[in-house]
């Protein structure tokens, strides 16, 4: 299956929640709610168009990855990559497509 990364859109919220549910079950963690994912679009330190990607394959979202400038000061960052751990293509698409870069100062 070919998987392509692209920035998430508000209209993707239900599909992102579904993809994250698959991750949550495999990782045995609490799933994200639709309200929580919708809130990501309003976090001032997170520019989803620049800092996040969804992996789209076979017409559906298969994962989410992003980097957040935690606190907005440019000193701490969170990396978030959630896909089915058995599926490598969405992992790579989310991470490679996120534009995440590390610079040591």
Image: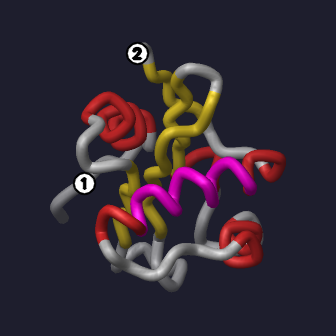
The residue that label 2 is drawn on is: 1
Q: How far from the left and from the top, in percent, is residue 64?
A: 49, 50
Q: Main secondary structure of the magenta part?
A: helix
On the rendered image, what quadrant is the N terminus found in? top left
- Residue 13 sits in which quadrant? bottom right
Residue at position x 58%, y 74% in the image? 32
Q: Residue at x 54, y 41 (%)?
A: 54
- Would you say residue 16 sits in the magenta stretch? yes
Which of pointers 1 and 2 lies earlier in the amino acid sequence? Answer: 2
Marks 1 and 2 close (CB-CB < 8 Å): no
Pointer 2 local density, CA inside 10 Å: few below 14, some 14–19, many at least 20: few
Which of 18/46 is in front?
A: 18
Report how many numbered discs are placed on residues in the image: 2
Question: Residue at horizontal 44%, vertical 43%?
Answer: 98
Between 71 and 48, which is closer to the camera in this rendering? 48
Marking on residue 69: none
The answer to which quarter of the image holds residue 103 is: bottom left
Q: Quadrant of residue 80?
A: bottom left
Where is residue 77 shown, x and y percent of the image?
36, 72
Q: Which residue is mark 1?
A: 102
Cα distance, mark 1 to mark 2?
A: 29 Å
User: How busy is the neighbourhood of tag 1: few (under 14 within 10 Å), some, or many (20 plus)?
Assistant: few
Please state the extent of the stretch shown in magenta in the rendering: 14-24
The way the protein has been coloured in the rendering is: secondary structure
The residue drawn where x is 64% and y is 23% is 59
Outermost residue toward the right? 11
| Left or right: where 31 falls relative to 74 | right
Asked if the magenta segment contains residue 87, the reply would be: no
């Amino acid at each position: 299956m070919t998987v392509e990364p692209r920035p998430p859109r508000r209209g993707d919220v239900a599909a992102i929640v579904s993809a994250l549910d698959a991750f949550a079950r495999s990782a045995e963690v609490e799933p994200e709610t639709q309200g929580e994912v919708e809130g990501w679009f309003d976090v001032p330190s997170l520019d989803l168009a620049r800092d996040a990607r969804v992996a789209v394959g076979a017409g559906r979202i298969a994962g989410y990855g992003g980097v957040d400038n935690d606190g907005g000061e440019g000193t701490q960052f969170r990396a978030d990559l959630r896909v089915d751990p058995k599926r490598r293509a969405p992992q790579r698409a989310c991470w490679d497509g996120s534009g995440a870069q590390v610079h040591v100062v």
